[in-house]
Amino acid sequence: MARVRLQQLEKRYGDVLAVRGVDLEVADGEFVVLVGPSGCGKSTTLRMVAGLEEITSGTLTIGDRVVNTVAPKDRDIAMVFQSYALYPHMSVRENMAFGLRMRGTPPDEIAARVAETSRILELDAYLDRKPKALSGGQRQRVAMGRAIVRRPAVFLFDEPLSNLDAKLRVQMRAEIARLHRRLSATILYVTHDQVEAMTLASRIVVMKDGEVQQIGAPLEVYERPANRFVAGFIGSPSMNFVPAQADAGRLLVGDLAFALPAPFAHARGAVTLGIRPEDVRTRANAGGMRIPARVELVEPLGAEAFVTTAIPGGASLVARVPSRELPREGETVQLSLDVERLHLFELGDNGRSLALVEQSAPKPAKNRCVND
Amino acid sequence: MTKTRAAASHTVLLFVTFVTLLPVLWVFKMALTAEQGFNMSLNPFPDHPSLDNFRVFVSHTDSTGHWIFGRQLANSLIVSITATLGGLFLAATAAYAFSRFRFPGRRAGLTAFLLTQMFPGTMMMIPLYLLLHALHLLDNLLGLVLVYTTTSLPFCVWMLKGYFDTLPRELEEAARIDGASPARIFWSIVLPLSRPALAVTALFSFMTAWNEFIIAAKFMDREEHYTLPVVLASYVGSKDVQWGYFAAGSLLVSFPVVALFFALQKHLVSGLTAGGVKG
Ligand SMILES: Nc1ncnc2c1ncn2[C@@H]1O[C@H](COP(=O)(O)OP(=O)(O)O)[C@@H](O)[C@H]1O
Ligand SMILES: [Mg+2]
């Protein structure tokens, strides 16, 4: 069983605690993506799992074995590096065969496995080329081939697509998703790109400053972010945040007062209101919270457009609207915010979601909120 | 305008080239002139070209009249090649450790290596003499090998460490995950990618050992233990200087270094790690 369990995993570099108390369980065959801004400790976490960084404290289990001090080669893992790390002086074939040779696999089996893997990855034609003579996308596939050919229990990916151009990235993303289904492999994948995380993951782990902020299925994290950081990090364009006051069943936004939505009835004092751009309408005929706003910027994308507006009190709200409903810049519109999809957070950049703090709806079991 | 500039710069370059090459041409001239005198004429071409000097140099005999040049050539080759290969192995392994591992004494070791480079080699003559004496390795080729290997080691270690530092670590990490041992990573990943640095280091070690004169002259007593620079110097006595033989010998002795340079030149390329890592 290729289960990976991280318990209170920590990494300290001198005075810096780069990874703080990470708890995570990756089930067999699961595709778990660690996502977060640059420097939040994703790579360090992954490298501890790989055995390339010493674990400062905590327990790492792969399968049924605690592997804290086991050498990387004995952990039954394979890793795909951001830089690909292909051996420049070896052909594609030798690159893929190297790991098998090191493990004493018989030559005919090596040949068979390299052939099979290169067929899956459509690298047959390039087997005798050196990495130098390959395009970025092909190098990326060789890097994956080198991992796949070994049939490890766990695949580790560290930002494998970040060196590709946008089009190739989308293509390779789909390829990785296909490979995951085909190999039913256990994958731990690191990226700073939340789109990659959303599209690939069975579960997402959002990290910040070395700490896990939330763990959950992509949509779960999207719909019910545990705190303001997660809410702002997942989703593009980012969720709108507006300062507000909660008081005696009312929600005050600037001079406007609304009834406090039911899940937040208990909220008191200064809060941050969060609403995703797609939950803001500019042609309001439905109900919801209605706020007058001046249109400041319209960015058409084709089928839809991002409309940036200024609301009373100085905050700005971005709405994502269908192109046929486009307002004009400078126009005053009635925004309508979908009350059902409103979020309230405690104050601060990391403010907890008030829906999760004390709430009526059942709390998703896997959500974990480690901020303080 | 550009034409006159080009003409001017070419004139200057030709002149400088001529000035640089003139001494070399003179050596050729002396080597190809049968008389042993020192001809001050500026004409770089010999009046009566002859290969006699070369013939005399390679048929050099000892006091009893036995041909000994072959033996001395072999001495030079054995000492230089052994010192180069041994030095390269020691320097590469040490440099890799200095580059990749953090151990107590790392900084001190590197600094000590640098310090030894600040003193002229001749300053170490007496300690080296005493050491070799204690080891009973005076007048012994192995003694020379030891001296040459160790004296070129600091430079080689720094040189190779500098290169290893530039090799991307992910390659070694990938190999570790692939199951390669540290020794295997060193042999199969690091060394093949370090060819340019290894070639330069080898050339340096070989040249140092091949051309070294002072220590060889002092430490080797018997003529059959002489290396070529010592033989060469014997033509330049205090009273009697045989310029023709000396010049012919110099040319012959510098030939292997030139040959080695051309042999190693194809390894002196950049971009060996191209395609391996991106970003
Ligand atoms: N070898 C190291 N020495 C000191 N600090 C390090 C080292 N590696 C990483 N860090 C620090 O640990 C933090 C997490 O780094 P990393 O895991 O690479 O972030 P991410 O992959 O999420 O961008 C960063 O603040 C980084 O500066
Ligand atoms: Mg990283």
Image (cartoon, helix red, strand yellow):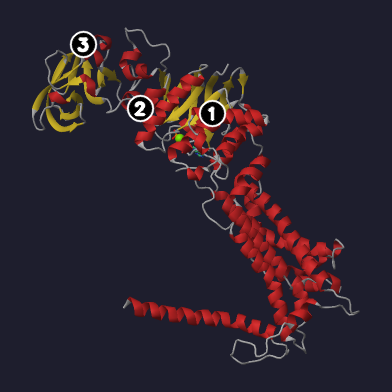
Mark nearest the camera among 3 and 1 is: 1
Circle on res. A249: 3
Identify the amino acid type marked 3: Gly
Circle 2 residue: A195
Q: CA distance from mark 1 to mark 2?
A: 27 Å
Provide the secondary structure element on which disc 3 rests: loop
Is residue A219 among what the camera can see? Answer: yes
In the rendered image of this protein, does residue B19 appear above or below residue B268?
Answer: below
The residue at 57%/45% (across/down) is A89
- B181 left or right of A309 in image: right
- Would residue A24 appear left or right of B26 to someone viewing this image? left
Furthest-right residue in view? B64
The quarter of the image holding the C terminus of chain A is: top left
The answer to whether the residues at label 3 and label 1 have Cβ atoms under 8 Å apart is no
| Amino acid on which disc 1 is placed | Thr
Residue picked out by circle 1: A117
Nearest-to-viewer mark from 2 and 3: 2
Lateral position of residue B203 relative to residue A333, left or right = right
Could you say where residue A253 lies in the image, as x and y percent from the top left?
A: 18, 21
In the image shown, does B259 or B216 lie closer to the viewer? B259
Residue under the image location 51 percent in, 21 percent down = A183
B271 relative to B240, above or below = above
CB of residue at label 2: within 8 Å of ligand 1?
no
Instruction: Evaluate if marks 2 and 3 touch, with contact meaning CB atoms under 8 Å apart.
Output: no
Callout 3 crowding tier (Cα within 10 Å): few <14, some 14–19, many ≥20: some
**Badge 3 sits on which subunit?**
A
Quadrant in which the N terminus of chain A appears: top right
**Callout 1: residue from which chain?**
A
> How packed is label 1: few (under 14 Cα within 10 Å), some, or many (20 or more)?
many
> Residue most toward the left?
A331
Q: Earlier in the sequence, mark 1 or mark 2?
A: 1
